[in-house]
Image (cartoon, rainbow, N blue to C red):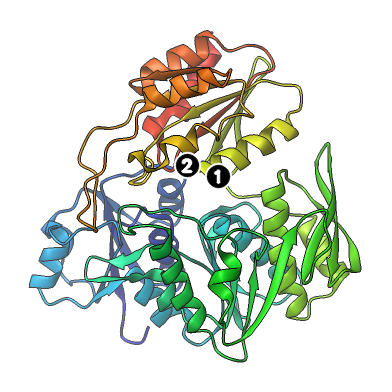
Amino acid sequence: MKGIKRVHFIAVCGTGMGSLAGLMKSRGLHVTGSDLNIYPPMSIALADWNIPVSHGFKPENVATDPPPDIVVIGNAVRSDNPEAQAAKNRNLPIYSFSDALYEFAMRDKRRIVVSGTHGKTTTTSMLGTILRDVGLEPSVLLGGISNNLGSSFVEGKGDYFIVEGDEYDTAFFDKTPKFLHYHPSFLILTSVEFDHADIYFDLDDVMDSFKRLVAAMPSDGFIVSANYLPNVATVVKDAPCKVIPYSVSSTRSSGYLATGIVEEKFGTRFELLYDEKYIGDFFLPTFGRYNVANATAALAVSLELGVSKQAASTALGSYCGVKRRQEVFGEVSGVTLIDDFAHHPTAVRETLEALSSRFRGRRIVAVFEPRSNTSRRSVFQKAYGESFDSAGRVVVSEVDQGPIYSATGRVDEFFSSTELACCLRERGLDAVALDGVESIVDEVARLSQVGDVIVTLSNGSFGNIREKLLNRLRKS
């Protein structure tokens, strides 16, 4: 950071970008940003950190006096972005988010990278909570706001830096996966499924990226991997370092195993084994087998780094979750409102199963927005039809028919919300597809019943549906 005083972020409201902006602001730098889509929770966090955000991308945002010492460009930015072009034309030093994070925050640390199709944010938050609570003072950067850490980043004085490792590409000028830039000392691999159809051709293409990550591991590092899930064991098969498997199952297996899972009123209790030998009982104050899996990965790394069983258990027992992961945002007249980031078919299924267990006996009303570059494609049409069985009612937003970005040059058919609703009705579910947030709010509020649990599922702001739905129910 020597000689750097002013930093500007283009597309600052991405969770990683915003977190890095906050970290640099905490070091006393002058930090500014710009974005088109400015919404909670990152918009609130940036305001709390006193980071000004300009709405829209304009050349004048980098034509300041004095100019930024460096410009960090998010991977949502395309090559024709007028602000990025202006920065290039002014010969300002340009960094991708991934390179800026490594160069200015991670290079001198022991890097724990949490990778996988699902569970990265939660696992990073859990591991950060454990290592912080036991006094190791890690630095942490995750793609969400951790309730325990009070932020999406922590700059600690200790040796470890824990970060999410995303397989998405780095920037318009660097099409390699972001996680290849982090050079992990230790790696968690939670899952490997097809996703990001805008930049990957198929599952094999995705697996090749993860294999490159594994192949670059140092021989004295280790990988904690969910080998019980499809594709993961294949990806780590030729790892140049120690591989420590973990699983969630009733069948005993090698490595770390969470078993004897019991859901209680305030969370989930489970036993942890290692190579079939009992380690101890643990309590996790949240729900869902997938969260037990995330906790098992975090515990495995903690114990491998020398954290005591008792200290890890106490820290995990204090876990409070991440915003937009099963986050309760309102309670009105016996109706509970929850927001969740789930958008991949597997994440939708696991989230709804967890909520069904957490709110046993209550109707789950799932309100789903197919928003990502993948979910707007027909690639998961059939898979989504099998993801909502734990819901009592499903409302699907009609798909935005605007252009779908494709780095592969492939043209895909649009996902059909109407077809999904029809498929769900054939499976015996009450389901409907509606166009527009106002129509959805009207319909959900009109048919809500005492005891309902309404969960919004989207990786975006969903047209500010949270606030609109909450306000509408209060007026009903």
Rendered view: 471 above or below 457? above
Labels 1 and 2 touching (C-beta < 8 A): yes
Residue in the image at 30% along x and 44% along y: 37
Q: Position of residue 193 (x, y in %)?
A: 50, 56
Q: Is residue 378 above or below residue 141?
A: above
Q: Identify which amino acid the numbered label 2 is placed on.
A: His
| Dot 1 crowding, Cα within 10 Å, few <14, some 14–19, many 20+ | some
Which residue, as the protein is rendered here, is positioned at the far bottom? 219
- Tell me where residue 450 appears, x and y as whole percent: 67, 12
Local SS, label 2: loop
Q: Is residue 427 left or right of residue 15?
A: right
Q: Is residue 324 visible?
A: no
Quadrant position of the N terminus in the picture: bottom left
Mark drawn on residue 92: none
| Residue at image coords 65%, 64% | 226
Q: In the depicted view, which residue is nearer to us: 466 or 341?
A: 341
Q: For mark 1, what is the residue?
A: 347
Q: Is residue 449 left or right of residue 440?
A: right
Spot occupied by residue 332 in the image (x, y as percentages of width and height): 62, 19
Q: Nearer the viewer, residue 8 or 343?
A: 343
Q: Is residue 290 above or below residue 392?
A: below
Quadrant placement of the C terminus: top right
Q: CA distance from mark 1 to mark 2?
A: 6 Å
Q: Residue at x 65, y 49 (%)?
A: 321
In the rendering, at what x and y percent does residue 284 appear? 78, 51
Determine which residue is flagged by label 2.
343
